Image (cartoon, grey):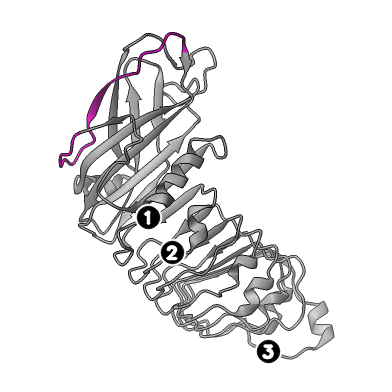
Amino acid sequence: MDCYDGDDHHQLASLPRFVGLALVGNPQLKCLSSNVWNMVSQTLILGDCPSIESLPEISQPVTGLTMLSIKGCRNLKSFPTGINNLKYLQILVFVGTDIESLPSAIVELDQLSHLELGSNKSLEFVPSDIHKLIKLSYLSLADCSRIKYLPELPPNLLTLVVSDCTLLQALPSIIGKLRWKELYFEHCPQLDPYLPQEVVLNFHNHATSNLHPQCVLQHSGSEIPRWFAYRSPNYASDSCPMLQLTLSNCTTKRLIKGIAFGMVCSSNVGFVDISIACVCTTTPVYWRSPNFGFGGASQSDNVYMWYDKNLLGTTLEGIQDEAKPWYERDAGLTVTFIFSLQPVKEEYAKNVKRIKIKSVGVSLLD
């Protein structure tokens, strides 16, 4: 693609029109034509183009473009001028670039729901008025190692990722009030003393309600919260334990709809993608957590918690079977849970053994 910057209307009319355009893995690509914004109706992806240092100006309103994804362009130093002209943008991804700040005009993207800014090592500040993005539900600042503070956050945010923000010192007050679906705070050593307890408690209260079928919380810490009904003693192992849990006494059948699982562990692996699997030997129930990653080769303890309210009638094969709901049937019933670490890819199997599990906790949700 050339870098012609003229505004010949005949040329604009003859430009090809793509639903999506991906320019990936081209180390020779140094610039984009200013007309690129008029060539794509929905999705523009730019990846692993290290020679690109800037993007063309967006001089006029662009209709239709809903996703802009820039990844691995490590010499890209700024957002395009006029980014507020992407009026319909819903997903904005700038990962692994050299940007130092976000333009103030970003808060004018009133359709934006997903903002991903991970691994921008030079990024120091987030606009103080980012809370104006009222449709924003996902924000990731993972591995932005120069960020020290977060501004007030948008009121409808459901997912926040600030893992590996090693200089992050404080959290905004609203963080203990939002109805979170996912929170990721591990490997933030400057947060004192780890994640505030009111944030964890607020997360638990919303996770056990009916707001979201699945909720995830990951943060630095060394204790399973006390609200987990069944907690294992502390130990260090490279495998999940088998837990025999005596369920609480009850006089009537209690339909179990979900499970809350917590784990304290550390690792010395560079990265591994795993999930937690659970088999209940006395009922036809199989549960598996969402996939999650260990990274950073951190020896410090981290707490991982999942809440899943989709257990009804799940068999060992993961097939829904309404004829086999999971009940707590008798007073003092003992149920055996067998937990195991499951690598997402075969190549991660060896690394799983380098994850040390120190304690786990389980609660049943109805």
Query: Which residues lie in the magenta part?
Result: 233-253
Q: How dense is the environment of label 3, judged by Cα within 10 Å: few (below 14), some, or many (20 and up)?
A: few
Q: Nearer the viewer, mark 1 or mark 3?
A: 1
Q: Which mark is residue 309?
A: none
Gap in angstroms between the C-alphas marked 1 and 3: 53 Å
Amino acid at dot 3:
Tyr
Q: Earlier in the sequence, mark 2 or mark 1?
A: 2
- Judging by the rendered image, the residue that carries numbered circle 3 is 4
Q: Nearer the viewer, mark 3 or mark 2?
A: 2
Q: Secondary structure at mark 3?
A: loop
Q: Is residue 27 above or below residue 170?
A: below
The rendered magenta stretch, by its main secondary structure, is classed as loop
The quarter of the rendered structure image containing the N terminus is bottom right
Q: Earlier in the sequence, mark 3 or mark 2?
A: 3
| Lateral position of residue 266 relative to residue 50, left or right | left
Q: Is residue 181 above or below residue 99?
A: above
Q: Give yes or no for contact between labels 2 and 1 (Cβ–Cβ under 8 Å).
A: yes
- Judging by the rendered image, the residue that carries numbered circle 1 is 196
- Judging by the rendered image, the residue that carries numbered circle 2 is 171
| Lateral position of residue 363 relative to residue 4, left or right | left
Identify the residue at horizontal 34%, vertical 34% (top origin): 228
